[in-house]
Amino acid sequence: MTRPTLLIHDLASAVSPAGKGPQRGREEFGKLEVHSPASIAVSGERILAVGPPEEVLRDFPPQKNTRTVDGRGKSAVPGLVDCHTHAVFLGSRADEFELRCRGATYEEIQASGGGILSTVEATRRGTQQELEAALERHLDWMLCCGTTTAEVKSGYGLDRETELRMLRAIREVDQRHPVDLHPTFLGAHTVSPEFEDARGYLGFVIREVLPAAAELARAADIFVERGSFEVPEARPYLAACREHGLVLRMHADQFSERGALPLALEMGARSADHLESTSDEGARLLARSDTAAVLLPGCGLFLGLPNPPVKLLVEEGAIIALATDFNPGSSFCSSLPVVMNLGCTRLGLTPAQALAACTVNAAYVLGLHQQIGRLAPGYRADILLLDDPDWRYLAYHLGGDHIAARVKSGREVR
Ligand code: NIG
Ligand code: FE
């Protein structure tokens, strides 16, 4: 019999998205498997069993070296998965935040040389050690709020050296930080200041940066938007990224709908992210595909953007994930529970849908839905113990201090 290394016993409840794959459609999206009361047995990095305390105890009695954790009065949910972040950057955009509070728009600031380019300037000046330290600080904030796996994009270098330095920083920090990292190459965040136009810049990226970046990243992303990249430029770029074996992602329809979604589907992108300007027609198209809709309500709140067509996406069966979009400009928010609250209060999701969107569906975006995002035997033991018997406090208590303990790959962290 497999010996448990960790036993969390007598929980008020253990709550997990039900089923195997990502959840989609009105019937399935937000369906939960609830054990109440519950115990969880873990062996090494994996979950052995989740179920009624007496059954778990009978099947997996604690041994000499089993660590036991008292779950009384607490609920457990899977560790949260943040599938869209820009968590490696240097510098601050607090001054721009204030300008926006005074009425300037994000796009105006961007057009006058601020925005993404001001973070590019600060990030280019940093050493790899400084980038790693900044990323670690940001990951500490995220872990504190329950994130146990995060995607992190490059995209504040826009030159060969800095883009690769960012990706190396992600790889290095992944070795030592409890949060598991998934690097995405976002060399196509916006046109580099050294280049006249988008076409010339993307040609340089394809020739000079992509081959090395593809060794360090798992996915590639592009910002399709006015002032950044248009569809005819994005198509050959994404094709080149795909040839290098990268999964495709896209910042789509953030400020305007300009053909990003049809392109995402044509290229078989894993996700289309933002969608604040997506039409009903676009939503229907996306919902019929296996490309996930990644919604970023922290960004919507920060920039005062309209909501994506969430009701239609849910009803038509889209695979919906929620993420922070954590970055210094459009979403300085590192908390997935805050995003879950916004998913409920602003986008009309139920708490259970918000949980699925930050666990199993976000794991799908990273290609990890068979490994993480559920509390079930065989899954990685990424577990949050919440300080309340009702797990919905995670979404309900806006800005609350919810988490009593975090288990990452079977070990209690911080
Ligand atoms: O997802 N839209 C483009 N990129 C980021 C913002 C990056 C920044 O402002 O630094 C986003 O919102
Ligand atoms: Fe983003």
Image (cartoon, rainbow, N blue to C red):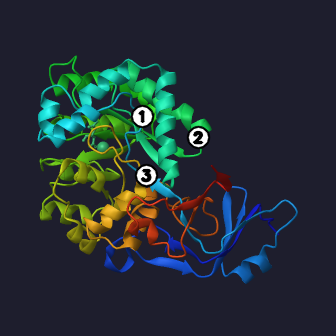
Q: Nearer the viewer, residue 401 or 83?
A: 401
Instruction: Work out how far the residue at label 1 is from the one at label 3, CA to CA, in angstroms.
Output: 14 Å
What residue is rendered at 59% in x and 45% in y?
178
Residue 288 visible somewhere in the drawing: no
Pointer 2 or 3: first along the chain: 3
**Image quadrant of residue 339?**
bottom left
Q: Please name the residue that numbered disc 2 is placed on.
A: 177
Figure check: 119 above or below 5 = above
Q: Position of residue 111 (x, y in %)?
A: 12, 30
Label 3 CA crowd tier, 10 Å (few <14, some 14–19, many 20+) = many
Figure check: 296 above or below 9 = above
Q: Nearer the viewer, residue 117 or 378?
A: 117
Label 2 CA crowd tier, 10 Å (few <14, some 14–19, many 20+) = some
Q: Please name the residue that numbered disc 3 is placed on.
A: 82
What residue is rendered at 46% in x and 27% in y?
131
Q: Position of residue 13 (x, y in %)?
A: 58, 77
Q: Quadrant of ligand 1?
A: top left
Figure check: 135 above or below 149 = above
**Mark 1 touching mark 2, by CB under 8 A?**
no
Instruction: Work out how far the residue at label 2 is from the one at label 3, CA to CA, in angstroms.
Output: 15 Å
Residue 249 visible somewhere in the drawing: yes
Q: Position of residue 251 (x, y in %)?
A: 26, 45
Q: Secondary structure at mark 2?
A: loop
**Image quadrant of residue 76?**
bottom right
Q: Nearer the viewer, residue 91 or 249?
A: 91
Hey, what amino acid is under mark 3? Asp
What residue is rendered at 56% in x and 38% in y?
174
Which numbered circle lies on residue 88?
Answer: 1
Pointer 1 or 3: first along the chain: 3
Label 1 CA crowd tier, 10 Å (few <14, some 14–19, many 20+) = many
